[in-house]
Image (cartoon, rainbow, N blue to C red):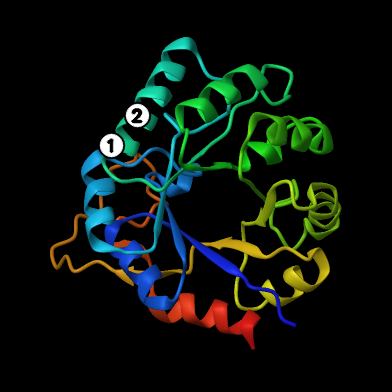
Amino acid sequence: MQPLYTFEICVNSVQSAIAAQQGGAQRVELCASMPEGGTTPSYSEIMLARQSIDIKLHVIIRPRGGDFFYTPLERKIMLKDIEIARLIGADGLVFGCLDRQGNVDSSFLKELVDASYGLSTTFHRAFDMCRNPKEALETIIDAGCNRILTSGQEVSAEKGIPLLTELVAQAGSRIVIMPGCGVNEHNIAKIAKETKAVEFHFSAREKMASAMEYRKSRASMGGDDSIDEYSIYQSTPEKVKKVIKALQS
């Protein structure tokens, strides 16, 4: 009997969230600043995403890019973001935190989980930066999280299959291990077969040309002229369907 799979699409906009639903996903993770690994989206983006889709809406709670050791002020921001995301319709929250030594910050994680009471919680890829993944898994379970998003501490989930397989076995039914990072139509079946994971996280984004006609070639908004200012990356229903079909078939 084929397992029941859950597909979560990492989306960078309301439009991408709509595309995820149209493509057959059961859940989205809404983020801003995807090139930085995702930061908390604006409140209007969360509200409009909630109004635009019927599938589950999870929101990343991350005040900045970079590492996962947070200052007292950043911690206050994260807790306030949880409060507001709840009020405006999030079904779940996605966060992670480490201490200076690279261990899961168990006390702050428990605070985040307690603040999220009643909502689904995912410990994000801060897990892939931790010192000891098997110890971290137990700490995250003890804190009460529902799932862990991880590439198996590698540059992609496909490369992380060995550790992902061990984590799925260690977790058992206590928490969901959700492979993510580089999951696509070419490798999702392999990842599922070898790891026995049943939830998958991918972006299904495609490059789209900007509708701008006038283009300024000498200036760059990010100060890096290697960045393409006139391309937009969005999830598409076709790409979502293609990845899902590759596993379900």
Q: Position of residue 201 (x, y in %)?
A: 57, 60
Can residue 219 be seen here? The reply is no
The disc label shown at residue 200, or none: none
| Label 1 secondary element | helix
- At 37% from the left edge and 70% from the top edge, which residue is drawn? 21
Q: Is the residue 179 above or below the residue 145 in the image?
A: below
- At 39% from the left edge and 31% from the top edge, which residue is drawn? 82
- At 85% from the left edge and 48% from the top edge, which residue is drawn? 170
Q: Position of residue 117 (x, y in %)?
A: 47, 33
Going by the numbered disc 1, the residue's amino acid type is Leu
Q: Is the residue 25 above or below the residue 74 in the image?
A: below
Badge 2: how crowded within 10 Å, few (<14), some, or many (20+)?
few
Question: Would residue 141 be found to the left or right of residue 53 on screen?
Answer: right
Going by the numbered disc 2, the residue's amino acid type is Glu
Question: Would residue 170 be found to the left or right of residue 228 on screen?
Answer: right
For the N terminus, the image quarter is bottom right
- Check disc 2 and report the residue beneath it: 83
Q: Is the residue 101 above or below the residue 65 in the image?
A: above
Q: Do residues under tags 2 and 1 come within 8 Å of each other at their CB atoms?
A: yes
- Check disc 1 and report the residue beneath it: 87
- Quadrant in the picture for residue 246: bottom right
Q: Position of residue 44 (x, y in %)?
A: 21, 44
